[in-house]
Amino acid sequence: MSNIEQTLSIIKPDAVERNLIDEIKKIFKENNFHIKNSKKIHLTKDEAAEFYKVHQSKPFYSDLCSYLASGPIVVMILEGKNAVMANRKLMGATNPKDAEENTIRKLYGISIDKNSIHGSDSLENAKKEIDFFFKS
Ligand code: CDP
Ligand code: MG
């Protein structure tokens, strides 16, 4: 049975700023993800607020939106077997301190807010997030 999925990944400003784009893309490829689409963009704070609106009631929401809009990001569609959950595993825990060895956040994350990478948390949200950035 085919369970090839697509998920949305974002290389966040802290990682773009440290020139980690190629290293992170290499990790995805080594872990059998196909990068179906990729673009470097710089969101406005309003766009970041729209993207992260599921977090609007959280105390960190405003800082989170400012941060996502603070510099260029790379948005990617990753495709692969069980891509949504496989990507969440490869990213590691939200707080890099709690992330497992060899996860992207363990390798590159600086702090709970500057944690280098975003990944969709469900198939339903993956579809919404892919549409947000790539709907023509
Ligand atoms: O990104 P992930 O799905 O692992 O975590 P989230 O709970 O959906 O939170 C979204 C983002 O908000 C995180 O990736 C962090 O950048 C940020 N965040 C934060 O700044 N402070 C927290 N206490 C929790 C999350
Ligand atoms: Mg999340």
Image: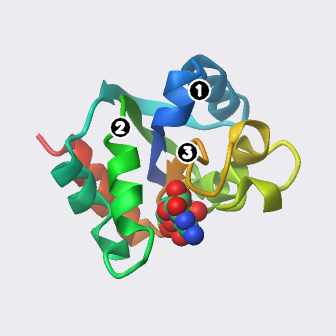
> Of label 2 and label 3, which has the lower sequence position?
2
Q: CA distance from mark 1 to mark 3?
A: 11 Å
* Residue ranking furthest to the bottom: 57
Residue where numbered disc 2 is placed: 70
Is the distance from the Cβ of mark 2 to the nearest ligand 1 atom less than 8 Å? no
> Under 8 Å from ligand 1: the CB of mark 3?
yes
Q: Quadrant of residue 39?
A: top left
In the rendered view of the protein, which quadrant contains the C terminus?
top left
- 62 vs 5, left or right, is left
| Residue 3 can be seen in this image | no
Mark 2 is on which residue type? Answer: Ser
Q: Amino acid at mark 3?
A: Ile
Residue at mark 2 to residue at mark 3: CA–CA distance: 14 Å
Residue situated furthest left in the rendering: 136
Could you tell me the amino acid type at mark 1?
Lys
Q: Which residue is mark 1?
A: 25
Which secondary structure lies at badge 1? helix
Q: Position of residue 54 (x, y in %)?
A: 33, 74
